[in-house]
Image: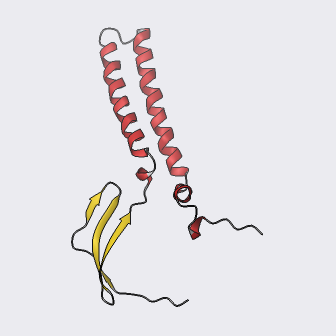
Amino acid sequence: MASSMAALSLPSTIRRDSNRATGTVHNHNQGRRNLTVKATGVAKFKGTYMREKQLTELIQQKVSEAKQVCEGDKTSDECKVAWDEVEEVSQAKADLMLKLQKQDPLEFFCQDNPETDECRIYED
């Protein structure tokens, strides 16, 4: 099977919608073709961005609640509990970020595309 290299010129405008970029590519040998590129980054995976955003908003909410509770007496049990809640939510976000750093993006790709060459499993 022979392969050939084609000279491509990148599009001058690219539309971005969700996690896809769409544009037109000019192949000098075959003319114009539409091109769609799917972004593959950490934030694309099934709600990761939303979970991170929700945890960030929850941290902000818990911090403001803790400040409000602690206005009168910073040594009260209610104040300590409020700041413990802030710490727990912050730790949950840190755990999510650590989990994402340790995961292999190929695993997520293969869950969605098991038939691709990159995801095939060969047994001896």
In-image side of 13 versus 100 (left or right): left
Quadrant assignment, res 15:
bottom left
The residue at the point 41 percent across, 11 percent down is 78
The residue at the point 30 percent across, 66 percent down is 22
Quadrant assignment, res 118:
bottom right
- Taking depth in this image into account, of 95 and 36 the one nearest to the observer is 36
In-image side of 25 versus 47 (left or right): left
Query: Is 83 drawn above or below residue 42 in the view shown?
Result: above
In-image side of 89 versus 66 (left or right): right
- Taking depth in this image into account, of 119 and 60 the one nearest to the observer is 119
Query: Residue 12: where, in percent of width, then height?
Result: 21, 73
Quadrant assignment, res 116:
bottom right
| Residue furthest right as drawn | 124
Quarter holding the C terminus is bottom right
Query: Residue 93: where, in percent of width, then height?
Result: 45, 37
Query: Residue 108: where, in percent of width, then height?
Result: 53, 55
Q: Is residue 67 visible?
A: yes
Please count the marks in the image.
Answer: 0
